[in-house]
Amino acid sequence: MIFGGIEGGGTKFICAVGTAPNDICAETRIPTTTPEETLTNAITFFKEQQKQLGPLKAIGIANFGPLDVRLDSPTYGQVLPTPKPHWSGANLLGMLHNAFDIPIGFDNDVNASALAEHLWGAAQGLDTFIYLTVGTGIGAGVFTEGKLLHGLLHPEMGHIPLPHDLAQDPFEGTCPFHGDCFEGLACGPAMEKRWGQRAETLPDDHPAWKLEAQYLSQALTSFIYTISPQRIIIGGGVGSNLNLLKMVREQTQALINGYIPSQAILNEIDSYIVSPDLGNRAGVLGAIALAEEAWNQKQERPQ
Ligand code: ZN
């Protein structure tokens, strides 16, 4: 029993074959160019692996969004309009189905990362939690009462409006749709544009981090009130800063101000707002998890 997983990112596609974090047999990185070229390279990798390892049972694709993940939609499996050139309308699922007659799981990268953290990482045993990534963009995968939340499309928690005090922070934001939404104010490129240097080069005592923690805590407080997660996992290039994480815990606790009478927030905030256990492996492992899920569904509902 072996599965394929594709983590489709804006700069690279990571393809892997295996079943779990400690059982990855092969892996490759493919530069993201056009959908046709990138997917063709991914398909070639999996065909090569099949020659050595035997047939794949299923493939999962965890791609950057926005995606059409509605099973009943005529454009299910496609990339929705995106500012990324060539990728709007790309039929990712169709291209894979043309090459492989096996079940194919399909979801966005943050939902897949949430799934991987649930199976193997920091959300094991929980049934409602949030996986938030703060990096080039801001996105969240949401697991509610035992399964990934999709709803209308999928949550877009990076684009919620936040209180923005222009006297304190005159930066107009980077989101092409909203300007100063959460992502527009707090993603990595917003930090770089506001402060004139890349986030990872800003020292821990730079005021950038205090402001970043302020925006993250405001967003987290809204998420805690609306979703009531049992834990929040924060990953991504910016989100992995441990000094930031510490400030976010303190400020989130202060904003909630005792209103939620849960030990998790009152006294155990260090294990409530956490880093991913799987680190930057969550995406590709999430793709493997999507494949396993697609395979299991096929067994339950053979066609
Ligand atoms: Zn936005």
Image (cartoon, grey):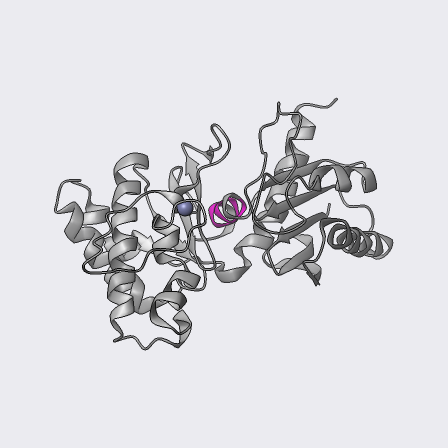
* Total labels drawn: 0
**Residue at image location 45% in from the left, 58% down from the top:** 277
Near-viewer residue (70 or 270): 70
Is residue 88 shown left or right of residue 128? Answer: right
Near-viewer residue (139 or 167): 167
Tell me which segment is drawn in magenta.
112-118
Residue 58 image offset from top left, x and y in percent: 72, 41
Residue 30 image offset from top left, x and y in percent: 71, 61
Q: Say which quarter of the image contains residue 260.
A: top left
Q: Is residue 194 above or below residue 139?
A: below
Q: Say which quarter of the image contains residue 166.
A: bottom left
Magenta stretch, overall SS: helix
Q: Is residue 9 above or below residue 107?
A: below
Is residue 34 shown left or right of residue 232? Answer: right
Decide whether residue 115 is among the magenta residues.
yes
Q: In this view, does 61 lie above or below 33?
A: above
**Residue at image location 66% in from the left, 30% down from the top:** 75
**Residue at image location 14% in from the left, 40% down from the top:** 259
Residue 235 image offset from top left, x and y in percent: 43, 57
Q: In which quarter of the image is the N terminus?
A: top right
**Residue at image location 76% in from the left, 49% down from the top:** 36
Q: In this view, does 231 lie above or below 80?
A: below
Residue 202 image offset from top left, x and y in percent: 35, 75
Near-viewer residue (180 or 239): 180
